[in-house]
Amino acid sequence: MDKQKKNNAVFVVLGGKKKQEDETLVVQDWKKAREEASAAAEPQRDEDEFEWLLPDESSRTEGDARVLYRPEVYQEKKGKSSALGRVMLIVISAVLIGLILGYGMLKVVTQKNEGKPQATLQEEQKPAAAPPAAEETPAKTPAAPASLPVLNTAIIQGGVFSTKESATTVEKATGYMGVPTALIEENGQYILILGVSQTVESAKLLSEIYKGQGADVYAKSVEWKAPTGSFSESIVNQAGALAVIVPVLAEESAKVAAGVPADTEKIAKAEKELKIIQPEGKEMTGLHKQLTAALEQIQSGQPTAGVEAQKKMLDFLSSYQKLK
């Protein structure tokens, strides 16, 4: 028992000598030392700094009045608010889209029907046409530029002159011989014509008679220039009807003037066609009268009457070329 009570001594051998160390070995508490070291490393807090102590959430109860925060309730309210916001956003978006589409459709329909009311308004603004007076004559349609028919005949020519004075001098001298004459201007020249017929043969037959009277003449075929002007459709039609009769009367009058009997059937047909034509205007009435007078002279059958008929035919050609 005494041996157990002996103090356990620690010996340190230094230089081969044993030395008893009186100091006892201190065993440190490492856990406590670590806490002290942490406390020493922690910075010194100000006296004014306040440390918030949050309650332990696990110890809270439903009936505890101190419960200020409940996560499950907050999450539930937040979920309901988010759902309501989404619903409101959808409704507002749908309303806006509906308004935009409705406005667009209204604009399209308005543009399509925009012209119709204007047309109706214009029709309503048109004044009612007044009934034509009983005494008023219908207005004539303005004449459009047109050409009269071309005449193809044979002529007895007495000369072509560059000046009107020279042509007039020869015309008067020829007229003294008892030969019918007409002076017609064409392309800046003056043509002296002494007779007209449908064929060159009849023109030559009559030209021989005129040569015997001292006239210097020769026969040839010509195409008369068609007059151009503002002629109505009615005038053009009448001129066309007269143009059919002119060659017949020219031929038969030349034969009668040369002492050859006229073709009675052709004369009768020409007379019938002349009676059908109802001339309009001063110019057409004058042309119609000249052909009628030539027809009457041809029907007498006398050579002198034939010469008068030739004079009427030359007057007709001169007047026809002056139409405008």
Image: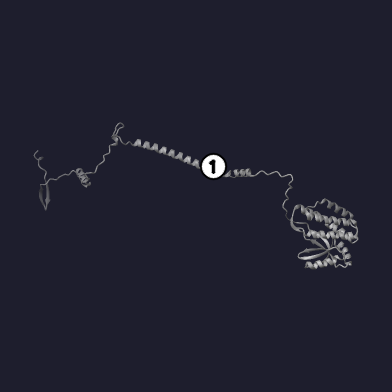
In this view, 23 is above or below 81: below
Q: From the image, which quarter does the N terminus lie in?
A: top left
Q: Position of residue 176 (x, y in %)?
A: 86, 66
Compared with residue 222, is residue 73 higher up or lower down, i.e. above or below?
above
> Residue 139 vs residue 268: left or right?
left
Between 21 and 281, the one nearer to me in the picture = 281
Q: Quadrant of residue 161?
A: bottom right
Q: Residue at x 82, y 67 (%)?
A: 170
Secondary structure type for disc 1: helix
Image spot of residue 197 (x, y percent)? 85, 60
Mark 1 is on which residue type? Leu
Q: Which residue is mark 1?
A: 106
* The quadrant where residue 244 appears: bottom right
Quarter-of-image position of residue 55: top left
Q: Position of residue 146 (x, y in %)?
A: 74, 56
In percent of width and height, residue 179 lies at: 86, 64
Q: From this viewpoint, which residue is outermost toward the front?
A: 135
